[in-house]
Image (cartoon, helix red, strand yellow):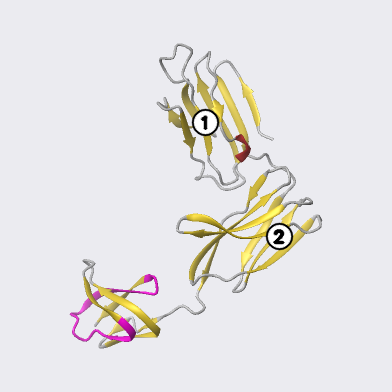
């Protein structure tokens, strides 16, 4: 559990970073003239000074998951700041992820300290938001368990993380897994070209110069660039942009 120790004008919040930020309620002072909190320190570093708002966020995203967290809130006497979501700083228990990896068809992870009736949520980054892909019930608790989940990767870079939730609601996140899936990815050649660029499949393409001016666009498996002046150009296709040299 988190630990809270209050001195005359200080409130300490301690726990472990699990991928979520902390939100703090900042009431007015007893005379109703100022806000209660003066400064906030994260692991000894000043991160907030004289916040002029009734609630605010302490950003912990610079920390690695599993890092010990100590937040010190310095405040005026006669008022009581409050951490709105203290449960996001779960104290280290017995459970932990020991490995998370992927291959062309699966995500694989190993854990220690698993308990009965806990649940895994496999999440994928989609449009800068974590989206649940599927949910798995924990196996029979053992000292070490390994899971293999079949999954369809998107072409290109995939970002995954695994959320483990205990029956009592406590949550632990794995580190973020980056997996670059190249199977089936459309490619082009040559990169140093005289006359034509070729694709390995039919695509919609655009060719632009270094000023980002679109010079050619179309659909097909090849494009004639013989009339382009010598220089560096960019070709966009299959949701990505790459560079080529016109000789």
Is residue 86 a member of the stretch shown in magenta? no
Marks 2 and 1, the one that precedes in the sequence: 1
Q: Mark 2, mark 1: which one is toward the viewer?
A: 1
Look at the image and tell me in which quarter the C terminus lies. Answer: bottom left
Q: Name the residue that disc number 2 marks.
A: 110
Q: Name the mark on residue 24.
A: 1
Q: Where on the picture, by quarter, is residue 16? A: top right
Residue drawn at x 46%, y 55% is 128
As drawn, the residue found furthest toward the bottom would be 195
The crowding category of the residue bearing disc 2, from other C-alpha atoms within 10 Å (few below 14, some 14 to 19, many at least 20), is: some
Q: How many numbered markers are drawn?
A: 2
The crowding category of the residue bearing disc 1, from other C-alpha atoms within 10 Å (few below 14, some 14 to 19, many at least 20), is: some
Residue drawn at x 39%, y 70% is 239
Q: Name the mark on residue 137.
A: none
Residue drawn at x 66%, y 33% is 2
**Height in image: 243 above or below 3?**
below
Which stretch is magenta? 219-240
Q: Is residue 218 left or right of residue 97?
A: left
Q: CB under 8 Å between callouts 2 and 1? A: no
Is residue 228 a member of the stretch shown in magenta? yes
Residue 55, given in percent of the width and then of the height, sits at 47, 30
Q: Is residue 229 left or right of residue 123?
A: left
Residue drawn at x 49%, y 28% is 40
Residue 165, given in percent of the width and then of the height, sits at 68, 49
Q: Is residue 189 left or right of residue 207?
A: right
Q: Main secondary structure of the magenta part?
A: strand
Q: Where on the picture, by quarter, is residue 88? A: top right
**Height in image: 196 above or below 181?**
below
């Amino acid at each position: 559990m988190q630990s809270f120790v209050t001195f005359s004008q200080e409130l300490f919040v301690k726990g472990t970073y699990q991928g979520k930020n902390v939100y703090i309620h900042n009431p007015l002072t007893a005379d109703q003239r100022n806000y209660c909190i003066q400064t906030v320190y994260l692991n000894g570093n000043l991160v907030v000074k004289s916040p002029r708002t009734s609630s605010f966020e302490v950003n912990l995203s610079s920390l690695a998951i599993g890092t010990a967290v100590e937040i010190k809130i310095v405040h005026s006497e006669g008022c009581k700041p409050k951490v709105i979501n203290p449960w996001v700083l779960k104290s280290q228990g017995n459970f932990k992820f020991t490995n998370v990896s992927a291959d062309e068809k699966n995500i694989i992870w190993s854990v220690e300290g698993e308990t009965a009736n806990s649940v895994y949520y496999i999440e994928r980054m989609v449009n800068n938001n974590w989206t649940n892909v599927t949910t798995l019930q924990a196996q029979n608790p053992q000292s070490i368990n390994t899971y293999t989940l079949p999954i369809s990767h998107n072409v290109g870079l995939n970002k995954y993380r695994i959320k483990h939730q205990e029956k009592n609601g406590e949550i632990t996140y794995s580190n973020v897994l980056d997996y670059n899936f190249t199977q089936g990815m459309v490619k082009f050649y040559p990169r140093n070209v005289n006359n034509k660029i070729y694709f390995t499949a039919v695509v919609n393409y655009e060719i632009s110069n270094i000023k980002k001016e679109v010079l050619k666009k179309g659909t097909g498996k090849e494009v004639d660039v013989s009339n382009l002046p010598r220089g560096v150009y960019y070709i966009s296709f299959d949701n990505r942009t790459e560079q080529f040299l016109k000789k």
